Amino acid sequence: MKLIVGLGNPGGKFAHNRHNIGFMALDEIHRRNSGFQPWRARFQGQVSEGRLGGEKVLLLKPSTYMNESGRAVGEAMRFFKIEPEDIVVVYDELDLPPAKFRMKKGGGHGGHNGLRSISAHIGQEYRRLRLGIGHPGDKKLVSNYVLGDFSKADQDWLDPLLAEIADQAGLLAEAKDSQFANKMTLALEPEKAQRGNKTASQKPDKPSKPKQQSHIRQARQNKPAANLPKSGPMADMLKKLLGGGDKT
């Protein structure tokens, strides 16, 4: 059993908040992948079982509010005996621009209260799908910003992002995080993906070092042009050195 957790706050008034993008992602996975059971209350949250790729998967949206998300995750993890590396947590990331995403395994909570709670209950070695929502620019504005709704203009990037996560969710379930990230980038940022492939395929060859030459070879390549003695001991020595003697 693999566990995919979306973070957010329960209730209609929070449904469209930036802080609830994790819930939105799980709702889209549930909607676009047939075979998932209807949502039901369990493990202090809303859950649905189904299959993604070749894996049996539990989708979990904690109903504990963001700050206590770890209670729900820990309960589901213990019941199914799931290892942390088989858990993916999907959540909002202030430090990424809107529409950007990053995959990461382990690490700190970065000030996110949902992650703080989960790490306190199950440790830090779970996998994370960070979804960028941007930053309001002032720390004092963060609370109102994350608890504010996405704007109509945000739908231009939000809908494609959530749809692509749902379409590639099988790779998440199978722990193929690099392939998941590549597919996402190819679909959402094709120009960036093409630049990356071009750069990788056109790495310049290392310049070859000039071959070292012996002093005699250098002397042969740099023969004196004039005023060489034509006879005598010196002439004989120069002929032997520079290769000017009679051939046998």
Image (cartoon, grey):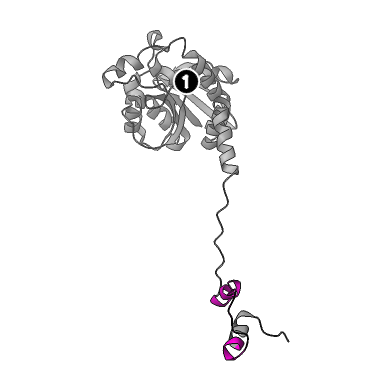
Residue at image location 29% in from the left, 17% down from the top: 141
Front residue (pair 151, 118)? 151
* Image position, residue 222 (x, y; %): 58, 72
Residue on which the image places disc 1: 47
* Image position, residue 15 (x, y; %): 42, 12
Q: Quadrant of residue 210?
A: bottom right
For this orientation, the residue located farthest to the bottom is 233
For this orientation, the residue located farthest to the left is 140
208 w.r.t. 153: above or below: below
Left or right for 147, reference 26: left
176 w.r.t. 188: above or below: below
Magenta residues? 215-236
Front residue (pair 83, 228)? 228
Q: Amino acid at mark 1?
A: Val
Q: Quadrant of the C terminus?
A: bottom right
Mark 1, Cα crowd under 10 Å, few <14 / some 14-19 / many 20+, is many
